Image (tube, rainbow, N blue to C red):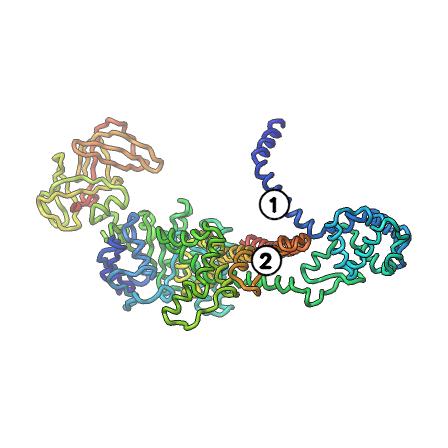
Amino acid sequence: MSAGSSRTGRSLLLLAPLLLFLIGFFVWPLFSMMSQAVSDPAVLRLLPRTAEVVVDWDRKSPPTMPMQTALMEDLRTVDDDQALGDMVRRLNSARSGFRTLMSKTTSALEDTANPPADLISIDKRWEKPEFWLAIADALSPLTDRNLLAAVDLGRNSAGEIEHLPAEQSVNRVILVRTFWIAALVTFTCACIGFPYAIIAASLTGWKRDLMLAAVLLPLWTSLLVRTAAWFILLQEQGLINDLLRWLGLIDAPLPLIFNRTGVIIAMTHVLLPFMVLPIYSVLITIPNNLMPAAASLGANPLRAFLRVLLPLSLRGVASGGLLVFISAIGYYITPALIGGPGDQMISSIIAFYATGSANWGMAGALGVVLLIATLHLYSVYARLSAEEQGRR
Amino acid sequence: MAEFIRFDRITKFYGSLCVVENLELDIAKGEFVSLLGPSGSGKTTLLMMLAGFEQPTSGDILLDGTAINAVPTHKRDMGVVFQNYALFPHMSVGENIAFPLQMRGMGRAEIAERVARALDMVQLSAFAERRPSQLSGGQQQRVALSRALVFEPRVVLMDEPLGALDKQLREQMQLDIRDLHRRLGLTIVFVTHDQSEALTMSDRVAVFNKGKIEQIGTPRQVYDEPATRFVAEFIGETNLVEGVVEAVQGEEASVRLTSGAHIVSAVSGTVATGQTVYLSIRPERVDLTEIRGGARNCLETEVTDSVYQGDHLRVQLHNAAHPLIAKLGRRSREFPPGTKVFAGFSASDCRVIAP
């Protein structure tokens, strides 16, 4: 018994570095991303007293006196201008007009010589329940605003979910574009990678090694370097255009960079190993006498391929496709460098929110959407491969 | 005997390596021919050329009078049974057997009927829905066999199909295949390195060595009348004794051994007086007696060892110049080592082989 538990303890000790690493660099960031997406502390942090009294409010009638005094009390104690700015931005996005109302209110409250009796005496707008409703809603520490906004939805004043106006609806377009580019890249990878893997698996000796090395070598080079190399190759005065013009095939340079074509070419190249290797690993497990057997039974090469080799290698194509697709929807550097403004994918938007506008909530929410999409794909794949196993 | 399959001066090189050399072989319709030889002797290569997986470097393969060198495998109409069965793992047993029929564009109802009959023939009707991986080796082999037969091919080719089975199952399958051959009148070309398998099943055995056929004949011929030293040693066990021909008379020759003893032996090839030859004496044809018996050939020997092997006694003998082995029946008395015995055998039980 004690020997058993000490052995378990020692095994855990061996695993400890891994577990610590996983917790520190995988579980914790994932958790904080997800909590950023749904947390909304900007208002609650500054208005704790208001939060206590607003619970008793019926959400319809004009504000009660305790609510007004609590809010005034809260606003007086705020000494962090940036936090105040965050709160005002948050409230203004729920109800326009808050910005002017708040600046008027705070400056009135700073006038200690002549303290106002209540908020309504500062501005008539404080009478209206809508403004208080916005505060009451914003006081909840959890929100679905970011998640809804990530898919271009929002709540109206009645709290119902509705589509955001068209000028604010870019996320859905970008999400669809992301999936479309990823699908195109997966398709071209499969078109190139499948025949490539078949040829590599059918060869022996140094020829096979050479083909595999040709796939693996780019994998050992940094992604940034490879993308930069494509940048040089694809530009108007780049190698490809120069060569085509020298051969006399084209007169004017082909537009290969800062557009969709360039993005697809570069991403296909970068992701090709992830398609070739799974297919190859499945192909080499297929006994090499099955194709001769099919031929001897009267199948011409095409039918032998369709009936024997293709179904047997489909598992490899599926896992390769999944790997490529999942990697592709998270791509950032390649579309940013090679693509035009119309080719930016969801990661660029996440990066914009995270580093450009410091809106961690939106960045987290888009990240969650991406994560959910990936998990869905994976569960579909897992179910398909489980069925496959069951049939065997 | 009109030939059905004809290999006409077939040569096959892999790079600079010659695996089949100027080979001639005719096979009649309905015949069961085994290609027997050690690995690397070219027998499998010959079968692969017949199936169309390999192309001969030179020479023609004729089927029913027409050259088929240019005909691709899928149009040759030959059923091939592979060493590792080559069943399609993603199809059920029934689908595997239906495959060649589907390739021939047969109707659904006819396919179902033929598959049922084919499964019945190998007693696997209950397994039609199973995957090949759920069957035992012997069952998989039977599926492979019925898949190769279901479309009634003109020729059935088998590449060491029983190699992966255990001994008992292998012997059962040998008899089953032999029975199918007789019942269906199939033309079968069977590759094996197992001489007892070839002897059990074949109408004729072609013994391969280094890309050439050393001898072709009925199992009785290749065993009892080996034409070359290779055949004598490869098929069964034999005593090879060196000697010089003293006289040839009709189908018999008189040979003087290095020990000085004289042996009268049957001759199959042509030997000249004075030539150094080998005598092949099958161990089971040797009789041991303590007094000089009435056999035509008699060698004075001494027992060095005697091993009881269940169905026979294996006795090692030694005379002045060469060791000998004798296999005695169960009824024979035992000879303790050191016993002086006479090893006797008739002239027709030994064979002169030119080296």
Task: Quote the CA–CA distance across marks 2 and 1.
Answer: 21 Å
Could you say where residue A208 lies in the image, as x and y percent from the top left?
Answer: 38, 53
Tell me if residue B126 can be seen. Answer: no
Q: Same subunit under labels 2 and 1?
A: yes
**How dense is the environment of label 2, judged by Cα within 10 Å: few (below 14), some, or many (20 and up)?**
some
Tag 1: amino acid:
Phe
The kind of secondary structure element at disc 1 is helix
Residue most toward the front? A113
Name the residue tied to disc 2. A348
Q: Residue at x 27, y 40 (%)?
A: B284
Could you say where residue B161 lies in the image, as x and y percent from the top left?
Answer: 38, 52
Q: Image quadrant of residue A165?
A: bottom right
Query: Mark 2, chain letter?
Result: A
Q: Nearer the viewer, mark 2 or mark 1?
A: 2
User: Between residues B95 and B128, which one lies in front from this camera angle?
Assistant: B95
Query: Mark 1, chain letter?
Result: A
Residue B68 tag number: none
Image quadrant containing the N terminus of chain B: bottom left
Q: Residue at x 28, y 68 (%)?
A: B66
Tag 2: amino acid:
Ser
The kind of secondary structure element at disc 2 is helix
User: Between residues B304 and A204, which one lies in front from this camera angle?
Assistant: A204
Question: Mark 2 and 1 residues: CB-CB less than 8 Å, in contact?
Answer: no
Q: Residue at x 28, y 53 (%)?
A: B42
**How dense is the environment of label 1, judged by Cα within 10 Å: few (below 14), some, or many (20 and up)?**
few
Along the polypeptide, which appears first: circle 2 or circle 1?
1
Could you say where residue B320 lies in the image, as x and y percent from the top left?
Answer: 16, 31
Residue A26 tag number: 1
In this rendering, position of residue A254 left or right of residue B213: right
Could you say where residue A325 lies in the image, as x and y percent from the top left?
Answer: 55, 58
